[in-house]
Each structure stands twice: as structure tokens, then as C-alpha cells.
Image: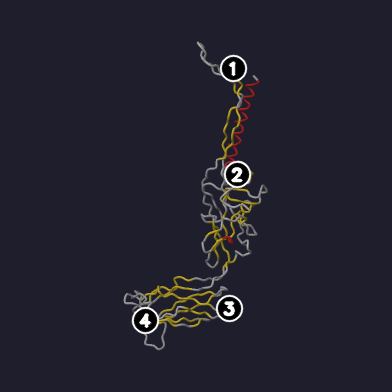
Amino acid sequence: MMMSMYSAVSGLKSQQTKLNVIGNNVANVNTLGYKSQSVAFSDLLSQTISAAGAAAGQTGGTNSKQIGLGSQVSAITKNMGTGSSQYTGNDTDAALSGDGFFIVQGGGLGKYQFTRAGNFGVDLDGNLVVNGLKVCGWDSSQYNKTTGAFNTQTAVAPINMFTSTTGLNKKVIAPEQSTKASMSGNLSFDTAIQAGPTYTADATSTLTAYNALGKSYDVTLTYSRTAADTWRVVSSGTGVTSTTSTLKFKADGTLDTAGSTINPVVTIAASAPEPTFDVTVDYTGVSMYTSSTGKSSVAVSDQDGYASGTLQDFSIGADGVITGSYSNGQKQPLGMLGLAVFSNSAGLDKIGENLYATTVNSGEFTGAVAA
């Protein structure tokens, strides 16, 4: 009687464990990054009343007689498959597709903790955080402008959105000096030819150039038709050293670069201590066709250089790169999220707050470099 009761009780205890796991799964149905669990049972040691017997002569073989002593929980398994993604409308949120974990610091258990929750935010000091923990990855100082890639062979560390590890203020993007500009548009074939020696403007366009300090200068380009196939372009403006170019056009209306006399370099000689700089102007995008309006129109199609700007917003790309958007229309990378991958992610321990910690059966993470 007692044996049967003990066996039944062990089954009840096993089923209670399963109910506990199911209840926890239900309780966390809306928990970000939560991984559900499942329970597997196994039987306990069986009592053998009589052993199996082999056949002998006229007697057949007999099976052993065993009485099971109940059941036990053999495993509580984490289901590490990818869950569904939701659009939150928040550009700072991120989700993981497939294997991997975000790397965080500050949980108090080991140097790193790991999470699938990507509801990121920024604290007062500019740290990228999730639930009060600092999110780790690579700083903008590890970004190579030439290759357009981060050096991910360095150790991951908390990402700060406002200041780089080298002390650079990410809240402000430095100005870039203008060096070149391209013009495009059409000078109307129907424009009357001017005899000179003085000329009025048949068309004008304005190029805004920036010096190394981000101060802007307006360069006005004045276009006057001086012959059937020729236009005169004069640059002018405050601080601008005036130049004159001659644009000659072919019979098909395209620019005859060989027959033109172009002074492409516009020098802006500002007052000291502001630096003097040159901008090279490209006119190959300008044509001379009959215009439906009878008017000419030439404008800047491309140029470099810009004033300084302040950080307005940031977004996280599919590659984990965090890109800042600035008030001057420019963008630059602020950092890159690190991703931890484990040989056995089901071996991680849940430590609460959507966090996981490594165990001897999960192994250490790969995919990023630990400090």
C-alpha cells in the first residue's frame, strides 16, 4: 500500500512541476524576449520481484517481474526558437532574427549578461540601455570611414550615444570643408545673343560652400549668352575671387569640353583668421537645348561640404549599426551592437529581468570579443 502511494505522489509532484512551468509560460506571454519551457518525464528505478528466465528444454522463457516506483522530471527544456516580431514605432527598438543574444552589463552576475529583449533607450548620460542595463557593442571610434565597416575584432563595451571612447562629442557632427560641386541644367537655345562688352545675366545659380569651420559662403554663378554656341559664366560673391569661364556647346546641345575655356577653381578668400579654400566646379552636366518655357535653369546637382549639426535622432539598422541623424541633414554611425552566440544556448541560466547567464554547459559566447 505504501509503495503505491509513494509512486502516485511522485507522479503528482512531477505533474505539479509541469503545471508550474506551464503557468510560468502563460504568465510571460507578453514578456519581451521570453523563451518558453517544456517539461519531460522519466520513470524512476523499478523494483525487480523476479528476474527474467531463459528457455530450457520443455520450459519457455519468462520475463522479469518489475514494479515501477514512480516518475520524475527528467528535463525542463528552454525553447530557443525565434519568436514573432512586432512593429513598435520606436526607432530605438531592435529584434533578433535567428540565434544570438544582445550583450549587456550591470546585472551583477558576471561581467556580461545576455538578453533577447531589444526595447532600448538612452539614459541621461547617453548610455544605450535596456531595463537599466548598459548595452554592449563597438564604439564609433572603431568605425573605418574608408572601408565603411567596424573593427569587430576588439572587445565589446557599453555603447554611449553622446561621447566616444576617444572623447569625441557625438552630439555634434563636425563641419566638412567644401572641395567640389557639380552643376546641371539647361541654358536655353532661344536666349538672345549679347554683343558685349558688358553682359547682363540670362541665368543665375547659387552654390553654398563651407569652410573648415562650417561657415557658409554663397557663390553666385552668372550665365550670359555671347555667341550662337557660347555662354559666359562669371563667379562672384562676398569673399569670392571672381573667375570667368566660357562654355562652348556642340551641335547636339552637349558641352564641348575641349572647345570650352573653363576656370573650374573658385577661390574663397575669407578674412583672417578664417581659412582660404578652393571649390572645383564641374559644368559637364549643363546642356543647351530649346526650352519649352524659353528660360534657362542651372542648379547644383551635387556637392560636398556642410556646416556642423546637432544630433536629432538615431536608428538601428538590420546590420546592428546605430546611425545618428543630425540637424544639418548628415548622418554618421554612433556604434554597432554586439551579438553573442552560444554552442548550446539552451544551457544558459535564466536570472530574471529577461536576462541569461552562462553556465558550464552553455559555453562562452562567440560572435563578439570579450574584454
SS under mark 1: strand
Q: CA distance from mark 1 to mark 2?
A: 45 Å
Percent across and percent down for residue 132 are 64, 52
Q: CA distance from mark 3 to mark 1?
A: 103 Å
Q: Nearer the viewer, residue 125 or 40?
A: 40
Q: Which residue is mark 2?
A: 363
Q: Is residue 295 visible?
A: no
**In this rendering, which labeled residue sits more in front, label 2 or label 3?**
2
Q: Quadrant of the N terminus?
A: top right
Near mark 3 (Cα within 10 A), the count class, few <14, some 14-19 or many ≥20, is: few
Q: CA distance from mark 4 to mark 3?
A: 36 Å
Report the residue that reaches farthest toward the front. Answer: 57
Q: CA distance from mark 1 to mark 4?
A: 114 Å
Percent across and percent down for residue 267 are 50, 80
Q: Quadrant of residue 122?
A: bottom right
Q: Amino acid at mark 3?
A: Glu
Q: Which residue is mark 1?
A: 50
Q: Which residue is mark 4?
A: 230
Q: As drawn, is 230 to the left or to the right of 16?
A: left
SS under mark 3: loop
Q: Which residue is mark 3?
A: 274
The answer to whether the residue labelled 4 contacts the one labelled 3, judged by CB atoms less than 8 Å apart, is no
